[in-house]
Structures are given as structure tokens and as C-alpha cells.
Image (spheres, coloured by chain):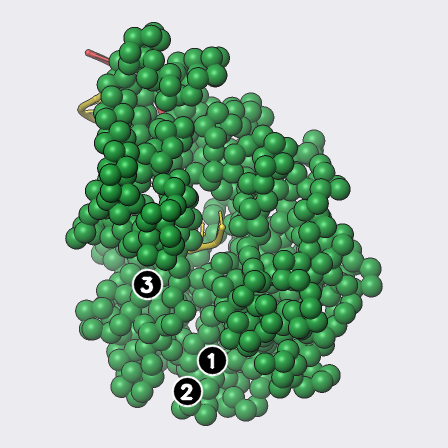
Chain colours: A green, B yellow, C red
Amino acid sequence: MAWDDGLEQGSEAYSIAASDNNRIRVVAGPGTGKSFAMKRRVSRLLEEGIEPSEILPVTFTRVAAEDLHRELVAMDTPRAEELNGTTLHSLALKILSRNHVLEATARVPRPLNEFELEPLYSDLCQHGGKRDVKKKILAYHAAWARLQHDDPADVEEFRDPEFEIALNSWLTFHRGMLIGEVIPYLYQYLRDNPVAEERSEFRHILVDEFQDLNRVEQEIVRMLSDYADVCIVGDDDQSIYSFKFAHPEGIKEWCDNNNGAEDLALTDCRRCPARVVQMSNHLIGESPTRDHNRQLVEFDANGEGEVRIIQFTDLQQEIGGIADIVEDLMGQGTHPGDIIILAQRKIIGTYIYEELVNRNVPTKSYYQEAELDDEETQERFAFLKLAANDDDRVALRWLLGRNSNTWLRGGYAHVRSHSADTGLSPWATLLGLQDGVIQLPYCGRLIARFAEILERTEQLQQLFADGGHQALVEELFPEDDDRWRDIRALSLEILENEEFDNEGTLNAFVAELSYAIAQPEIPSEIQDVRVMSLHKSKGLSAPATVVAACVEGVLPRRPDEDQTDNEKLADIEEQRRLFFVGISRVKARPDEGEPGRLFLTCSRRMAAADAHQSGIEPASFEYGEAVMNASRFLNQLGPSAPEREIG
DNA sequence: GGGAGAGACGTTTTT
DNA sequence: CGTCTCTCCC
């Protein structure tokens, strides 16, 4: 298919795809077809013979990158197969792994799993205990994300230079990197090497969801852009990532910082039915902090759509009511894959998921998957890493300490300093301790534990030598155990798809598996009702959308008491944008009998324990139940919103 | 290095 | 309300 196939000349989407200005900004509201326009632009570049390796399409999530790739291939665009859509993160990991970059950064880009952070907290606990260590790590990330690192006027409350030196030293010694350091290290490398070949590697850069990038990410885009044409796309009305320090001002100021930039906009909401467009406009228009008045424009062919707002007496009723709605819709012929249910609390989403599963509705839950939540699974995975590489210092450190409250930090400190002094690896040092060649104080338990680790590791390596990857998977993640069913499935998938079984090294297998765990695949063929958070729903659309738990305390959540008034206001406004993102998922497909349906539900009461557990602060408690008011946002949907129903 | 008891904290989420 | 974390003491 040609890049301009079916594109009307002079239309907004056509201009975006066709423009050869070297700086383009596109502001595009929800449902206005920005992915479509981006796709056509990339397609044009490929058709004009630009090398795929010289085009860098940056997306916020890997799912979005895959979508772009798949759709281009489906269009039969020349060389689309070779085009790699990527997240800034995987780009950063790739660049940081290049040999000349490894030397420049002096750090190994081996990201730590969440669970592997525990011994790090313990080893650094002299800096104020686990809680403070976590806060200081967050402050360290925050400073990077906001590019305050080199600013002497840095006011970050929990910054602690001594701590950061100790953290860096721990990570250097253990040959690891925090996930949040990956972007900063790429930033430093590019900044310090202005003529690095990476800075002129691309001729065309396209960035989606620009409002969700933080400062350091935006700066990386700038540093990659000296020799490239750049097209950024975003919408500050959909900025919902303040927790990762997103810098939505960047998209507003972008044209001022890029002279001669062409400023384009997509305003026709081709996705949503008219009522939903009107309600979305009204909701976002009520924001006291919004500094413009962009409106989504209705797409007449979509029709009015259907909207219901329902309040239930308690959470059980709401969950049952939502399940009834789903069954009704399916009875009328709606495909389960065309229904999404958004709940901003995992516990509520999980109740809905369980109710639907009980009623035999095909359902999938998209809350953070937990392949590695279980300790036994963590241990098996750590052993796998160690069997692949006995100098995996992070895995070894974790395995040594895991059975102890103190992570055996006393003895380990001696092992570490001895190892640093002599240049021996921790593994070699422990072997020396075991043989009595090396003597260090307080290492009794450490040596005993190491003996177990050594035995198990040798056993696994023998197993691998005899039976290959398959034997190892069967040993570590045997069939019919829920705890590692997911990780087993991922392992088998890798062994099936790749030539690992005979060819690949154990190291390569472990790397693939780690990558797969960090970024679980989302199937492109959707057969199920999808239950997820509002954040996850970004980029999706569905003919039937339910937003559950539209109550004060959840949506909007209650801001922290110790915040300033301005911070509280900013918090509420981000929640408004979150709700805006949620309701604008609704897709009208009138010719297929799907008018586009939106259900906003809430309930009056829920169990106090559930409320506590998920951080819901209700209006009040009565007889062990939380009493909740309907969300203020339901009052701000304007005249197109229907009367509230009793559920 | 480990156990008992007191106190803090709890949400969403990307890589 | 229940779990995690920290402190104190052995």
C-alpha cells in the first residue's frame, strides 16, 4: 500500500506524513489518529529509500513499538521488516552495551530485577535504614530525570552525596545498573562525547507521547537530533506520568526552542462518539490549570453513542453490575475483545476479573504481572543466572543473603572489601574462604551458605552440559506448579523460537529470559475482556468501555496531606487527565452495530479493610465500611452527560 | 545473628 | 486491617 493511499491531500494527517520540514510538532488529542499519521510518515520515508536503520521511531511502551512495526509490515511498506521501533530505554541499553561505550561509562548495563535490590538496601542501610535508602534512590533518580544533577542549587530533599557515592560503588562492584540509571548514563555519554557516532546515527527521529518524557529523555532526543529531521507528537492534556517526572512543558516550549518548526495539529476525534467527545471537552475544559482551550472536534459519521452513569450501594453490587453489563453486551453480539474495564485500583480490578472468570466470561487482567513475586521462583531464577555466569555478582549477593534478615551484610562486607583489594571476584574469594586459603572474620554463615550455593550451581551446570537448556528448564521450572508457570512458559517459548537448544549459550538464554520477564508480551489478537488500570489503557480503544470506581478518593485520589496547595492542585489535575484518557477510549463503529458505549460506575460503600489496603481514603467510616462520594469529575461532564442511574 | 514487640504504611506506573 | 520494617535485647 502506498504511504498516501486514501489520504486526502491537504488533510492534517497528509501534512504530517508529507512535510519535509526538519522540525515538526504535532499536537494531537485522543482518537485523532496520531499513530495513523506517524505510520504514514514512516511509510513515506521508507518508500523514498531512506535506510531503515537511519529512522528512529521512539514510542513510550514496547507495545506501541510493536504495533507500529506490525502495521507497517501489513501495509507492505518496503523494508518495513528491518525497521525497529523502540523505546528510549531499549535504545539506551543497546548503545550502553557497545564496547566503546562500556569503556566510557565504566558501568555494566545489567539491570537489576526488583527483588535483587533487597541486598543492596541492606548493604547500604548505614545510610539511614531501608526506607531512607529507598527515598534516597528515588531522589537520585528524580534529580536525573529533572536534570538537576549538576545544579549546585539542587533542592532535592533526600539527595545525599555520600550515599550516592556508596550506591555507585556498590553497583560498580556488582556489575549492575539500576533500571532508572540506564537513561542517565546514555545522557552522560552523549553529552560528554559531542562527536560520538551515536549522535549522528539517525536521519529521521519520530517521537510519540512526547509529553510523557522527562527532561533527561527529552535532552537525549535533542542530542540525537543534530543531524536528523525530528517529528514529535503528543498532547499535554494526556500527561499522566508525573510519577516518573514527565515534563509536559517540553512539548509546549518545543517550537520556541526549535526555530522554524512547523506546528501541526490533529483535532478531529474520529474514534469517539459525539456524546463522549462533548463530555471529554467539557471535563478537560473545567481544569483551572489548563492554559489553552483546544477542543476535540466531533466526527459526524460516528453518531451520538451511549453513555450511562450508575451508582451502586456497595462494591459487591458494582462488581456484579459490571459483570451484568458485560454479559448483556455479549448477549447483544459484542465481542469480548471489544470490551475494556478500567479500574484505578488493582484490588477492584481483580474483584471484577474474578467475577467475570466465575461467570465463564473470557477475561484477561493486565495489572502488573508477577512472574517473580514468589521467593522460591526468585531463587530458582537467581540460580539460573549464576549457573550461566558465576561472576554474576548481583545474583550471588542475593543468594548468599536471602535466608537471613540481615542479608549477612556483616560478613559480606569483608568479602567485598577483600575482593576489591585483591581483584579476585567474590566467587573466587568465597572459594578461597571455603578452602581456608583466605581467612576473614564473621564469615561462618556465609561460608556455609556458599557451600550450598556452590553445590547447587555445579549440579545445574552439569545438568546443562548433559541435557542442554531443556534439562535446566525442567529442573528449575518443572511442569504443574503455579509459582513458576509463567516463567516456564516464557522459557519454553524462547527455546522454541530461537536456535538456543543446541546453539545458544546459557548466557544468551538467560539474557533473553530476563528481557522477556521485564517486558511481557501482550498478544495482538485480543479475544478477551480486558481489565486494566487507566495508565495501561493509553493507546487502546474499545467499543465498550467501563470506568469503575469513579469515587472521591480513587479518581481523583486524595492528595497527600503534607503537600502544598499547588502540589495538591497539580495532583487533582493529573487525575482529571487520567479520567479524560479513560473516557476517550470509547470507539464508535456504527456500521458494525457498535455505537460506542461508555459506562461510568461507582459505589457508595466498600469494606474498610479493602479501602485501607489499596490506599483509598473514603469520606468516612461507618460500621467497618468505607462510605464514598461519587467523583467530582462526574459533575464536570457537561450537559451531554446522562442522569445518574441507581444500580 | 536472630527473635519479640512497637510503629509505619498502604495507590497508579514506564524502562 | 494486615504486612512490612525498625529497634531493642539476648
**Could you say which quadrant of the image residue A233 lies in?**
bottom right
Instruction: Give how far apart the Cα atoms at labels 3 and 1 are.
Output: 21 Å
Left or right of residue A591, residue A207 in this image: right
In the rendering, at what x and y percent does residue A54 appear? Answer: 67, 58
Residue A609 visible? The answer is no
Q: Nearer the viewer, residue A475 or A583?
A: A475
**Marking on residue A365:** 3
Find out whether the residues at labels 2 and 1 contact each other: C-beta distance under 8 Å: yes
Note whether A437 is above or below A259 in the view shown.
above
Q: Which residue is mark 2?
A: A594
Note whether A601 is above or below A612 in the view shown.
below
Instruction: Give how far apart the Cα atoms at labels 2 and 3 are.
Output: 23 Å
Q: Estimate how packed mark 2 is, as few (under 14), some (14 to 19) or many (20 or more) residues with alpha carbons within 10 Å.
A: some
Q: Estimate how packed mark 1 is, as few (under 14), some (14 to 19) or many (20 or more) residues with alpha carbons within 10 Å.
A: many
Chain at tag 2 = A
In the rendering, at what x and y percent does residue A202 appear? Answer: 69, 55
Find out whether the residues at labels 3 and 1 contact each other: C-beta distance under 8 Å: no
Instruction: Give how far apart the Cα atoms at labels 2 and 1 are.
Output: 8 Å
In the rendering, at what x and y percent does residue A347 appear? Answer: 30, 57
Instruction: Say which residue appears at 58% left-offset and 40% top-offset.
Output: A98
Chain at tag 1 = A
Element at badge 1?
Answer: loop
Instruction: Identify residue type, mark 2.
Output: Glu
Give the mark, 2 or 1, whose residue is nearer the N terminus.
1
